[in-house]
Amino acid sequence: MRNRSTVLANHSVAVFVLSLLLSHHQVKAELAVESLLPSDNAELTHTFTPSGPLRDERDFGDYVVRIYREHMSSFEILHQGIRVHSGEGFKFRIGSIYEERKTNSLITMGADITGDGIPNLVISEWTGGGHCCYFFHVFELGEDFRHIQTIDAGHSDLADFRDVNGDRALEFPLFDWTFAYWRTSFAGSPAPRVILKYNGEYFAPSADLMRQPGLTVEELVETARSFKSSEEWASEPPPVELWSTMLNLIYTGNMEQAWTLFDLTWPEGVDGKDQFREEFKLRLARSPYWDAVFAFNQKDSE
């Protein structure tokens, strides 16, 4: 009996120790998995290496921004001495990237560009191409730091923040380059205008600021007649002027009129109408602004 009791006791101890070991390994495994997951404070532990000498440093309240540049460029944003954001690229500037050509005092560090009363910071970026690409990184410098968004201005080498409607909050007019190089050269590529306005969370297309009156009936008929006589119908139909005008109509809230112009213009006997229509629609759907443009066209047609 004593030996049996001893065996049972030893077995119980062994089970207990084994359970502790399994529990220990489970915790270690869970910690290993958690280390692979993104952290809300990932930037705090991110290793940042300046790309060159310090070229610019500015501060606002508890925030400091530093720009470094040698052959490439980098930046870091510190809040109360802790890095909360950083970036690397070809060239960065605090405020407007075009400062060599003009000074945009509207987007100085700490200016309220959204109109919500919270100070902002804009860091602009150029990737180094001949006419591309430009990005504008927009941040909130409040009690809590927030990266609002990065605006992709594409080939819009003069895009910048402006007060379009005089309400003291800034908008961002730019061009939509979805159709760049599509069926034509870059120089001939249509690029409809888009106006981004802060909606409380981020800058988005503003139907109120983009909407414009369409063509009169007389203008519509005359425009169709002019495009119909183009020599391009004999070589590479349709003429760029037709779908460039269609894009401008669509992006100003006149999509129904754009398709009327398309039908009035396309000559009878010229093949490819249906194919062009579908390819044009597919290209439109690739635009980052298409959902918003489509939505305010639908609303206008109701």
Image (tube, helix red, strand yellow):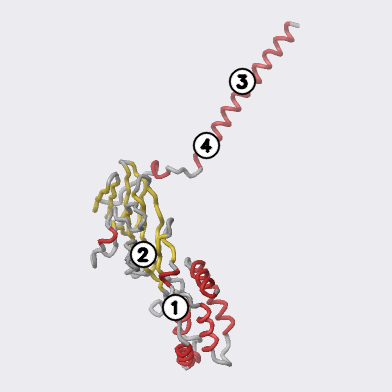
The amino acid marked with disc number 1 is Asn
Q: What distance separates the C-alpha of mark 3 from that of mark 2? A: 66 Å
State which quarter of the image contains the C terminus: bottom right
The amino acid marked with disc number 3 is Val
Question: In front here: 123 or 106?
Answer: 106
Q: What distance separates the C-alpha of mark 1 from that of mark 2? A: 20 Å
The mark nearer the N terminus, 2 or 4, is 4
Q: What residue is disc 4 on?
A: 32
Rendered image: mark on residue 17: 3
As drawn, 246 above or below 231: above
Q: What distance separates the C-alpha of mark 4 from that of mark 1? A: 54 Å
The amino acid marked with disc number 2 is Glu
**Are circles 3 and 2 on residues that touch, CB within 8 Å?**
no
As drawn, 209 above or below 69: below
Q: What residue is disc 1 on?
A: 248
Rendered image: mark on residue 171: 2
Where residue 230 sits in the image (x, y, percent)? 46, 91
**Which structural element holds mark 4?**
helix
Where residue 82 sits in the image (x, y, percent)? 33, 41
Note whether residue 230 is visible.
no
The mark nearer the N terminus, 4 or 1, is 4
The amino acid marked with disc number 4 is Ala
Crowding at mark 1 (Cα within 10 Å: few <14, some 14-19, many 20+): some
**Which structural element holds mark 1?**
helix
The mark nearer the N terminus, 1 or 2, is 2
Q: What distance separates the C-alpha of mark 4 from that of mark 3? A: 23 Å
